[in-house]
Image (cartoon, rainbow, N blue to C red):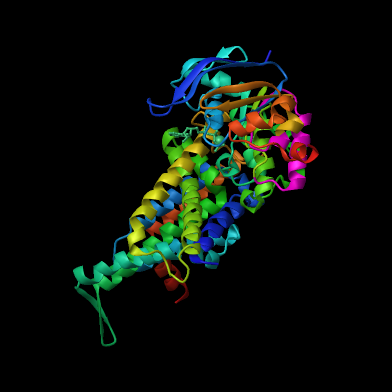
Amino acid sequence: MNKLQQAIAMLHEVDSEAGRSGDRSRIHPAARLFVNVLFILLTVSFHKYNMMGLLSMGLYLLITGIWEELSFLKGLKRIRYILFLIALLGMANLFFDRNIIFQFGSMNITGGMISMATLFIKGVFTVYAAYFLLMETGIEGSCAALGSFGIPKGGVTVVLLTYRYLILLLKEVQRMLQAYQLRAPGQKGIHIRAWGSFVGLLLLRTMERGKDVYDSMLLRGYGGEGLWKEAGSRQISSGLSVVYAAAWTLALGALRVFPVFQIAGSLFG
Amino acid sequence: MAEIEVSHLTFSYDGKRDVLSDMSFRIGEGETVGLIGANGTGKSTLLKLLVGLLSDHQGSILADGVKVDKKSLETVRRKIGYVFQDSDSQLFLSTVYEDVAFGPRNYGYSGEEVEKRVMEALGQVHMEEYRDRQIYRLSGGQKKLASIATILSMEPKILLFDEPSIALDPRNRRQLIHILKEMKGLKLIASHDLDLVLDTCQRTILIAGGSIVFDGNTRDILTDEKLLRENGLELPLSLSRST
Ligand SMILES: Nc1ncnc2c1ncn2[C@@H]1O[C@H](COP(=O)(O)OP(=O)(O)OP(=O)(O)O)[C@@H](O)[C@H]1O
Ligand SMILES: [Mg+2]
């Protein structure tokens, strides 16, 4: 399998695994979205040198991952390119912030190093949270949640269609790449001179396809809503959802305010 | 009284060259009609006009007594089901069930009713066992049958098919023919598969150069080698062998 096929297969895999978590699925997607957004906001709000506090937020991901039986490793494989990008961005900190914070043996640890690390961790946590949300509720469920928080339907539809469009785009790239390579044997990749027309054609073709898909939705009574209605006949328990959201709000708040690791350390130390 | 009435229909994509010009015909309730013609003669264009995917035409289109225009789209689309030439355009949700349920859900049916309609539709195309299958794991032919089911679940009075037998192997093609024959309601089938048209349609409309060249008994047109050739078509295999 080449990279492209892998990417397509991965999106399909996420699609098929997502939103099928048995009893746990009785929690309303909105409660999950709320907790995840809260988590992200609190995580991002940590000071750039507060590494320990930040790490304690990871407890949320740890517990969620275990409870939902989501594999961290599989997740890591899926989001690795995004993480790579974040790491690149974080590097800039090395150059801007050269204050020496403390010394580790003979090594000077600068503020830049710490803030690079915290930025990276924030990135990892945020992406993991988003990924978990997707896996917990599925794309349709996530959209339902967005909708129930008053995000305009048009906006939610854009999110959903973008997600679907991504798959179309990748498939189209694959189709065109195959057609190209069959007629340019022994050539690796696409010749630089063909790039312009390749990209242009790709956009046209996916837009055309996108329009057909949208037409077929309209023809089936789609009126800008309901697209992200709950899959199947999922039983939602509002009690459980409220408890879930409330418990995590308290827990995340505590993690944010108290230096949990230090307290734990002083208890045992 | 589900019927289609087209009168003096003229349409152009660019405002310069008419793809369809001054076309008139009427299809009565329960009729199954074939729509044939060489590539680029406007078959798909005509079907899209009928469901209002293309607008700004001249002349009038009545579907089940309702004039097709921007205001009536919702009403019209409840009456007409349209099966796309390319199944990948039709299917966009993750599983077969989800996709077939999409239409009924949009129309606000209860969970039970949706389930019932989905299973009935899948039963009609013999795809029950694929209900929870991921769409991307279906073969081309299975996708075609699934996409037909997405339309059947809405129980439209009028069905439009664009190249329904494309991508089907002989067995699935036979099954499709069987399904088409079983199906009630008005059907308009655009196809290059003249044998399929011969098998399923009493009546056939042949278009060329933007207008109707022939409208009548299927057997009459499909045995008229001269007329077919003049319009870029050939005798169906089943007939060319026997003559
Ligand atoms: N979106 C478009 N914009 C401009 N012209 C178009 C468009 N779609 C189709 N046409 C033109 O309109 C004419 C009719 O096309 P149409 O797709 O309806 O033909 P068809 O009978 O369905 O052909 P086929 O048998 O190949 O499916 C063709 O000449 C085509 O080039
Ligand atoms: Mg066509």
Image position of B130 with respect to A105: above or below: above
Left or right position of B147 against A148: right
- Residue B222 in the image: state x and y as whole percent: 70, 30
Give the number of marks.
0
Query: Relative to the observer, which residue lies in front, A245 or B208?
Result: B208
Magenta-drawn segment: B167-196
- Residue A151 in the image: state x and y as whole percent: 42, 36
Query: Relative to the observer, which residue lies in front, A32 or A225?
Result: A225
Please say whether residue A59 is visible from this viewpoint.
yes
Image position of A170 with respect to B77: above or below: below
Q: In which quarter of the image is residue A260?
A: bottom left
Q: Return the residue found at the far bottom.
A: A106
Left or right position of A168 against B148: left
Q: Is residue B195 covered in magenta?
A: yes
- Looking at the rendered image, the quarter that the C terminus of chain A falls into is bottom left
Q: Is residue A196 covered in magenta?
A: no
- Residue A123 in the image: state x and y as whole percent: 38, 61
- Residue A128 in the image: state x and y as whole percent: 46, 59
Q: Quadrant of residue B86?
A: top right
